[in-house]
Amino acid sequence: MNFEAIKSIYFFEMARMRRTLLQSVISPVITTSLYFIVFGTAIGSRIQTIEGVPYGSFITPGLIMLTLLTQCVANGSIGIYFPKFTGTIYEILSAPVAMTEILIGYVGAAASKGLIIGLIILGTASFFVDIRIAHPFMMALFLVLTAVTFSLFGFIIGIWAKNFEQLNIVPMLVVPPLTFLGGSFYSIDMLPPFWQAVSHLNPVLYLVSGFRWSFYEIADVNPVISLVMIGVFLAVCLAVLGWMFRTGYRLRS
Amino acid sequence: MPPIISVQQLTKTYGNGFEALKGIDLDIERGEILALLGPNGAGKTTLISVICGIVNPSGGKVLVGGHDVVKDFRQTRSLIGLVPQELTTDQFETVWNTVTFSRGVYGKKPNPALIEKILRELSLWKKKDNMLRELSGGMKRRVLIAKALSHEPEILFLDEPTAGVDVSLRRDMWEVVKRLREQGVTIILTTHYIEEAEEIADRVGVINGGQLLLLQEKTGLMKQFGRKQMRLELTERLEEIPPGLAPFSLSLGEDGMSLTHEYSHEESQDSIASLLSALSAAGIHFKDLSTRQSSLEDIFVALVEDKA
């Protein structure tokens, strides 16, 4: 293992986050605060509790997931796409590092950033609403697994993307609808049976549901199924990356 | 001693079907300076990219320090420093950080004293805290060289190092190259500037169309392909070359005031002596004499055009 290289890539990426503090930390925090003000306080005050949880508290796990997914996909993809775009990737490709080490450096940094922002939002939320965490260990597990999985997913997009449009398509056009329709702002029990069934095809539902369960012990699907689904998605991402690295797809071809 | 780099039957076909390398065989000796010449698109950069591990080969193999570049990439890549052709830099990084990063990704423990030494040698020390986007093109080129040297490589690739570079940087760069060579570093450079190859290389390889057309000691190459010319400025106008001088390859200048004699290195020196005595016998006198030797550039152009 080339630990020096992993360390170098990781801290290089984290330094980029420090430089772009405004964009990478402040902006998601402001956006989330706006959600709390609009949905939690203004509209939420007219909505009664959902399964015994006040609406503002109910949406908190979903909002954290929304930001975590978007941030991890964005960070994971830009981290590897940018060197590809500027050409500086030559150095990483000609260095004595294995692709797995490159992956650990980039994905580790992307997931760390996502986690930091997720925790900041959790902190921010506690100013607006009451937060109770029933299963802190499970909460941390869901958070870390989701951050890693979606950073890997972002890394795949970053390798695949040939231009900025392709790079942005998934984080802008795919992640938000899935999150909004994945029960971030409501319990899918509120939906008609047909849409309930459709929602079960949405992977984000399992994340939000499991994550919310770790807070309030209420869930749309069994938390064990949620964990299994994250595991499946993680395995799929790793398999795709394994194939990409073996063939040198769009990096060494 | 075995060659430090051994390229065997190397081929590379890109995804779009372009055949960049068509079976290259090349051995590079430890400690030599090898210049690779070739027109744009000849395959020079692809060859370097395969040796450095950036691009996977399609066929054949490459050994660096006796190790396979695909299987034992850690050993081979640790030996190599690469200065790419394009000025690719992380615009928002400082000089110090980007050079330190390079050392790190090559798996070497931090060594600020060494980085300082490299930056000083390349006249970058004063700029160490500047962001890369604030630097001129020539300064960025120096940074790329510093990055390549940061992990103390035994082999240095310079891909078109002097493209768009001013005189002072070029001089500094050759100073660095000479110093590295004294330390035993093997240097491979590609260039369009043939004078450079002529000046600093030990051997010259000519690549075109994905094939190595020629690989030779520079001096031998000059001898084999180099033509010599001797030009005589005459004191009196000459209408035509006297028949007695026919055995010599002579041509008369348009104004009749000069004679040019072409010969190769192989032709013995007494051909000139006998020409001169034949001239004086014919009553032809000259006021000045100059000789010219064909440069690598002439050789290169002749080779490339010949095979094209």
Image: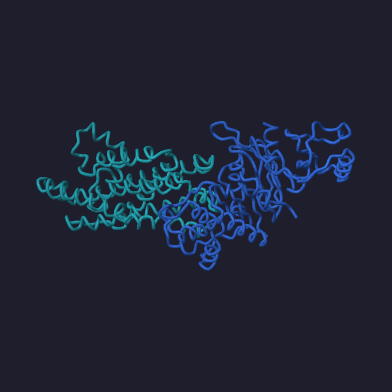
Quarter-wise, where is residue B271 in the image?
top right
Q: Is residue B231 visible?
A: no
Image-based side of A119 in relation to A251, left or right? left
Seen as rendered, the residue at the extreme left is A46
* Placement of B205 over or under B187, stated as above or below: above
Task: Give percent across and percent down for residue A190.
Answer: 18, 38
Specify the colour of chain A.
cyan
Image-based side of A142 in relation to B252, left or right? left
Q: How is the image coloured?
A: by chain
Task: Give percent across and percent down for residue A90.
Answer: 52, 48
Seen from the viewer's position, the closer of residues B95 and A183 is B95
Quarter-wise, where is residue B230 in the image?
top right
Specify the colour of chain B.
blue
Seen from the viewer's position, the closer of residues B81 and A5 is B81
Of the 4 image quadrants, the one containing the C terminus of chain B is top right
Task: Give percent across and percent down for residue B171.
Answer: 59, 56
Of the 4 image quadrants, the one containing the N terminus of chain B is bottom right
Say which residue appears at 82% left-offset and 35% top-offset.
B249
Seen from the viewer's position, the closer of residues B197 and A191 is B197
Marker count (numbered):
0
* Placement of B268 over or under A113, stated as above or below: above
Task: Give percent across and percent down for residue B91.
Answer: 42, 52
Seen as rendered, the residue at the extreme front is B236
Q: Is residue A244 visible?
A: yes
